[in-house]
Image (spheres, rainbow, N blue to C red):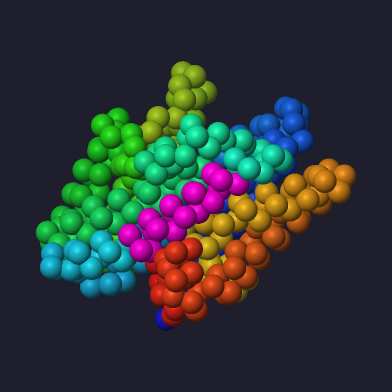
C-alpha cells in the first residue's frame, strides 16, 4: 500500500513544477520585463532547482529502499526495468517536445529540426534532464546495494559522505545527465537511509541533530552573505538542504488532494508542458492575456490533462510502455 504522506510530498513537488513552468511561460510569451515579475520567476526557479528536484530525489531513494536489498544477479532485470520505465518515455517526450517547438510557430522556444534533433538524445532536453539523472542514480545505487554497502548504518553513512564530496567535483562527463546525477546523488542516498534506518531517524536526538545542522548552515550562509558578500556555496546548500528535506520526509503527513496528484506525478512531469503550451497559445489567440486567467487555466490543464492521458493509455501495453513505461497494471516508480 502506498504511503499517502510520501504521495502528498510528491503531489506538492509536482504542483510546484507545473506552477513554475506556467508562470515562466506566461512571462516569456507576453514579454513581461517587470522587475518584480522577473525576481519572482528567479525565486521560483531557484526554489525548484535547489529544493523541489532534490525533494523528488529524496523520495525516489526512500521508495527504492522499500524493496529488500538486491543481489548482483538481479542487475540486468533491474536495468531493463529502468530503461523501460524512465529512458523510453523520456526519449519519446523529448522527441515530441522538440518536434512541437520545430513546427508550432507560437511556442516560446523555437528549434531547427536539421540542426539540433540528434542532440536531445545525449544532452538532456528541457525539464526532462531529471529523468536522465535519476536513471543513473538508480543504476549507481543498485551497484552499491549489490556490494552490500547499504547493509549497515555506518557503511551507508560513509557512502553519504563520499557522495557529498563527489557531488562537489566538476563532472568529467557532461552529457547523458551524468553531471546532474552527480549533484543529486547525496539526496537519493539520504532517502535510502531514511527508510533503511527509519528507527534511527525516528529518535528525538537525531531530529534535534538535524535541526541543529539546519540552524548552523543557515547562520553560515547569512554571515557569508551579509558580512563578506559571499554567495551560497554548493557545500553550504547541501548542508542546509539535506537535513531540511530529511525532516520534511520524517514529519510528513497526508493531504488527500495532493496525494492524489502525487499518484500521477510521473505522467504530469513528463507531459504537463504540452498542455500548458497548448492552452497558453489558445488563450493568446483568443486575445486573452490576463495573468490570473493564464495561471489558473495553465495549472488546471497542466495537471489534469496528463492524468487523463495516463488513465486513457495505461491499460494498453504498447502505449503504456512507450509513453509512460508502464505495464497494463500501473506499478510504483
What residue range appears in magenta? Answer: 83-100
Q: Is residue 99 magenta?
A: yes
What residue sits 31% from the left and 71% below the top? 66
Q: Is residue 48 shown to the viewer in this render?
A: no
Q: Is residue 74 magenta?
A: no
Q: Nearer the viewer, residue 254 or 99?
A: 99
Q: Quadrant of the C terminus?
A: bottom left
In the rendered image, residue 307, in percent from the top left (x then y), is placed at: 60, 68
Q: Nearer the viewer, residue 102 or 35?
A: 102
Q: Where is 245 relative to 164, above or below?
A: below
In the rendered image, residue 306, in percent from the top left (x then y), is placed at: 60, 64
Exactly how many numbered labels are in the figure?
Answer: 0
In the rendered image, residue 125, in percent from the top left (x then y), is placed at: 47, 42
Q: Residue furthest front?
A: 114
> Mostly what secondary structure, the magenta segment?
helix
Q: In which image quadrant can residue 296 be found?
A: bottom right
What residue sits 70% from the left and 52% below the top? 278
Q: Is residue 149 shown to the viewer in this render?
A: yes
In the rendered image, residue 164, in percent from the top left (x then y), is placed at: 28, 41
Q: Nearer the viewer, residue 143 or 108?
A: 108
Q: 34 left or right of 192? A: right
What residue sits 34% from the left and 37% below the top? 175
Q: Where is 130 relative to 152, above or below?
A: above
Q: 125 left or right of 268? A: left
Q: Quadrant of the N terminus?
A: bottom left
Q: Residue furthest right?
A: 287
Q: Where is 36 relative to 265, above or below?
A: above
Q: 92 left or right of 38? A: left
Q: In which image quadrant can residue 170 be found?
A: top left
Amino acid at each position: 500500500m502506498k504511503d499517502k504522506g510520501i504521495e502528498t510530498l510528491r503531489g506538492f513537488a509536482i504542483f510546484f513544477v507545473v506552477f513554475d513552468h506556467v508562470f515562466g511561460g506566461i512571462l516569456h510569451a507576453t514579454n513581461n520585463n517587470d522587475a518584480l515579475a522577473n525576481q519572482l520567476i528567479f525565486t521560483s526557479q531557484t526554489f525548484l532547482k535547489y529544493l523541489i528536484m532534490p525533494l523528488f530525489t529524496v523520495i525516489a531513494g526512500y521508495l527504492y529502499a522499500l524493496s529488500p536489498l538486491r543481489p548482483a544477479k538481479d542487475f540486468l532485470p533491474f536495468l531493463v526495468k529502468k530503461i523501460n520505465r524512465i529512458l523510453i518515455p523520456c526519449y519519446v517526450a523529448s522527441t515530441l517536445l522538440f518536434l512541437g517547438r520545430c513546427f508550432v510557430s507560437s511556442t516560446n522556444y523555437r528549434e531547427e529540426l536539421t540542426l539540433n534533433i540528434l542532440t536531445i538524445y545525449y544532452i538532456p532536453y528541457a525539464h526532462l534532464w531529471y529523468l536522465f539523472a535519476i536513471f543513473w542514480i538508480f543504476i549507481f545505487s543498485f551497484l552499491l546495494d549489490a556490494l552490500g554497502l547499504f547493509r549497515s548504518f555506518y557503511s551507508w553513512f560513509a557512502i553519504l559522505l563520499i557522495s557529498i564530496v563527489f557531488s562537489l567535483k566538476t563532472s568529467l562527463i557532461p552529457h547523458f545527465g551524468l553531471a546532474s546525477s552527480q549533484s543529486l546523488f547525496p539526496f537519493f542516498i539520504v532517502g535510502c537511509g531514511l527508510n533503511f534506518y527509519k528507527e534511527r531517524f525516528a529518535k528525538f536526538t537525531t531530529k534535534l541533530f538535524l535541526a541543529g545542522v539546519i540552524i548552523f548552515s543557515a547562520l553560515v550562509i547569512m554571515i557569508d552573505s551579509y558580512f563578506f558578500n559571499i554567495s551560497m556555496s554548493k557545500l553550504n546548500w547541501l548542508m542546509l538542504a539535506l537535513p531540511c528535506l530529511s525532516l520534511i520526509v520524517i514529519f510528513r503527513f497526508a493531504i488527500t488532494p495532493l496525494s492524489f496528484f502525487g499518484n500521477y506525478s510521473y505522467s504530469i512531469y513528463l507531459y504537463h508542458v504540452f498542455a500548458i503550451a497548448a492552452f497558453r497559445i489558445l488563450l493568446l489567440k483568443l486575445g486573452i492575456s490576463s495573468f490570473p486567467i493564464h495561471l489558473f487555466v495553465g495549472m488546471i490543464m497542466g495537471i489534469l490533462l496528463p492524468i487523463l492521458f495516463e488513465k486513457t493509455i495505461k491499460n494498453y501495453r504498447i502505449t503504456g510502455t512507450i509513453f509512460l513505461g508502464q505495464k497494463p497494471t500501473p506499478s510504483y516508480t
